[in-house]
Amino acid sequence: MISVLTLNLRFGLADDGPNSWQYRKKGFPYLFEKHRADFIGFQEANDFQTDFLNELLTEYDFIGKRSPSPSFWQNNIIFYKKTWTCIYREHFFLSPTPTIPSRFRESLWPRQCTIGMFKNDSHMIICVNTHFDFDTSVQIKSARLIMERLLRFPSDIPVIMVGDFNTTPFSPCYNIFTGHGQKIEEKECYFKNAFKKPFPGTHHGFTGSINGDYIDWILYRGKIFKQESMVIRDTIDGLYPSDHFPLYATFKRIEQSNR
């Protein structure tokens, strides 16, 4: 079984009053005692947030931290259990020049993607963690760029992609990932969603409302199937860990028949 958790941490330098990072970070030990996962994808991670999580998650290593970077920089971090080995990693910008800090002209912020290929005793998995901009045209170009980058990886290795996509499954970029309207024989290239309609709200703005937009996704493709998926709506001492709900899912390998 492979388990995955994703969470937009919320920019740690934001002035969120009683929901500021200095207060809500105290609940993270409880969150990860209760919800352990093989892979955890964080978005909007400032360096000091990553350092805090690295001290907390002692059973994990991580990839995706840009160094050096400005003090306000936000990364897409993948923490992975030390029972896995990262055999390849890459970090790139969602832009016309992915290898240098940059952005699409219409993008409000420089957006990024982290990809890791991992191996344990018997399995391999590719994990993708990203954070999309708000502009629809940028989201389309970003989705196409990620799909193109994934063509460089072995096609027989399952892929799990997590992130804050700042849009719902009724958007053009979602169709690019899921192959909506494509021919049946091409479907193996595309992703499935770990959640089904009616999609749950994931962004709640520290209100706890379950009626927010479903903008945080867990997508998967390849020879794995989803066993369980859930939205984590826990509070710790009355505080939510972020203005987004964490999402959690487990997957199992599709065993090949011996013929």
Image (tube, rainbow, N blue to C red):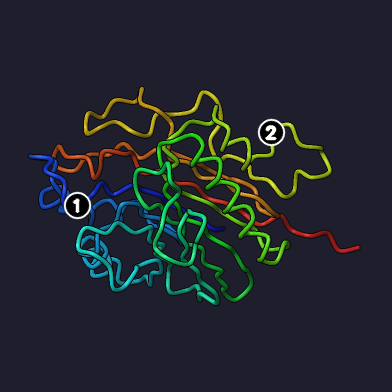
Quadrant in which the N terminus is drawn = bottom right
Q: Which mark is residue 121?
A: none
Percent x, y of residue 159: 61, 56
Q: CA distance from mark 1 to mark 2?
A: 36 Å
Query: From the viewer's perspective, is residue 178 above or below residue 122?
Result: above
User: Which residue appears farthest toward the right when viewing the image?
Assistant: 259
Q: Residues within 10 Å of mark 2 (few under 14, many from 20)?
A: some
Ranked by sequence position, the earlier of labels 1 and 2 is: 1
Percent x, y of residue 51: 23, 68
Tell me which amino acid carries mark 1.
Gly
Which residue is depicted at the point 41% across and 62% down? 78
Percent x, y of residue 253: 66, 57
Q: Does 181 sit left or right of 177 as displayed?
A: right
Q: Which mark is residue 180?
A: 2
Quadrant position of residue 182: top right
Q: Which mark is residue 12?
A: 1
Percent x, y of residue 41: 41, 55
Tell me which amino acid carries mark 2.
His
